[in-house]
Amino acid sequence: MTQTKILKIDANNINSDDISFAASVLANGGLVIIPTETVYGIAANLKNQKAIERLSAIKERSQDKPFSLHIANKEEIETFASQIPPAAYKLANKFWPGPLTLILQAKDGGTVGMRLPDNRIAREIIAQAAVPVICPSANLCGRPAPIGFSDAIKDLEGRVDLAIDAGRTTLGVESTIVDLTVEPPKVIREGWLEKGAIEAVLNKKNILFVCTGNSCRSVMAEAWLKKVLKDRNRQDVEVSSAGLLSSNATLASRATIEILGQEGIDVSGHRGRQLIGDLLKQSDLILVMEELHREKALELAPQVKNRLFLLKEFAKIDVGFPDIPDPIGGTGEIYNNTFSVIKEAVDRIAKII
């Protein structure tokens, strides 16, 4: 019988030594009861066979039935999973950290469940342990998942090495589980997050336009597609834009504001956004203005290759080259010509999405 050490930690006043101690116990093969925002869990080092055997015995679960991983940051999704669909990034960006477990293809060919808990204590312990951490609920088979420390320790004292007392969990309901290895994705357990909230995210297509500065071409494309979709009462598509060299301080160019204003579209409040991998990965369709943009996008996220296109590919207007040139600094006529090409291409896209 193990002697269980109990540490009381206040989430609003965390002692770094306590976190380091808990992380060390976990990394070295100990079983640690930790709080999450949903329920208390038993954390174990997936790479430590003895720890897995002990945990499986407590949970009365066959060792060939996997436990879900708990991670410390969203980027770790790519450490353990492969062939990650845009839907996974959409859900993660919307609900992580939080009560959502995603089932994905594992790099070993099987499947892996992952969750990023919305509990600072849990995340800091997992991060400092620097090992893959599994964390099923801290209860014996047949007992309810514990939302308070007293319930968590009641049946497990002497069976785990360390237990963190952080009071009552904030949500008290287990995570919702979504299987993304099937098409369409399937909610296989409805927890704190309702099925409707998951489906609302999954049922929307994300379209991203990319240019250099996010002040002219991509602004035109984004604004025009939003107008077309609104006119058609389409609410199942989210449209955004970004630029390779953009920042939040980037505004729409004056000529862009004027041209779109003639169409009844106001982009005077536009603020630029820099292109990052996360934006690309969650997009179902990515449309770039130049081959250079395609190359840079693939450097950031190679996995988006099959949903990345030159916008000009959708236009009937043929001016002899595949790029839509940057009109910045050009005449009003140049801007108008640029918008004509973009408008024609976007109209065609709106018909097929």
Image (cartoon, grey):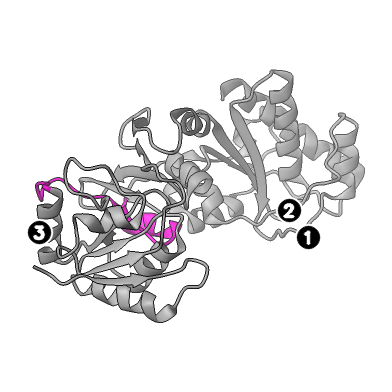
Query: As displayed, is residue 342 above or below residue 116?
Result: above
Number of dots carrying numbers: 3
Give the mark, 2 or 1, whose residue is nearer the N terminus. Answer: 1
Query: As displayed, is residue 43 above or below residue 187?
Result: below
Place of residue 152 in the rendered image (x, y in percent of width and height, measured from the top left):
27, 55
Give the mark, 3 or 2, whose residue is nearer the N terminus. Answer: 3
Q: Which residue is mark 3?
A: 53
**In the image: residue 210, left or right of residue 63:** right
- Are discs 2 and 1 less than 8 Å apart at CB? yes
Label 3, label 2: how many angstroms apart (C-alpha)? 52 Å
**In the image: residue 212, left or right of residue 22:** right
Q: Which residues are magenta?
A: 60-81
Label 2, label 1: how many angstroms apart (C-alpha)? 7 Å
Q: Which mark is residue 32?
A: none
Q: Quadrant of residue 223?
A: top right
Q: Amino acid at mark 2?
A: Gly
Q: Which residue is mark 1?
A: 249
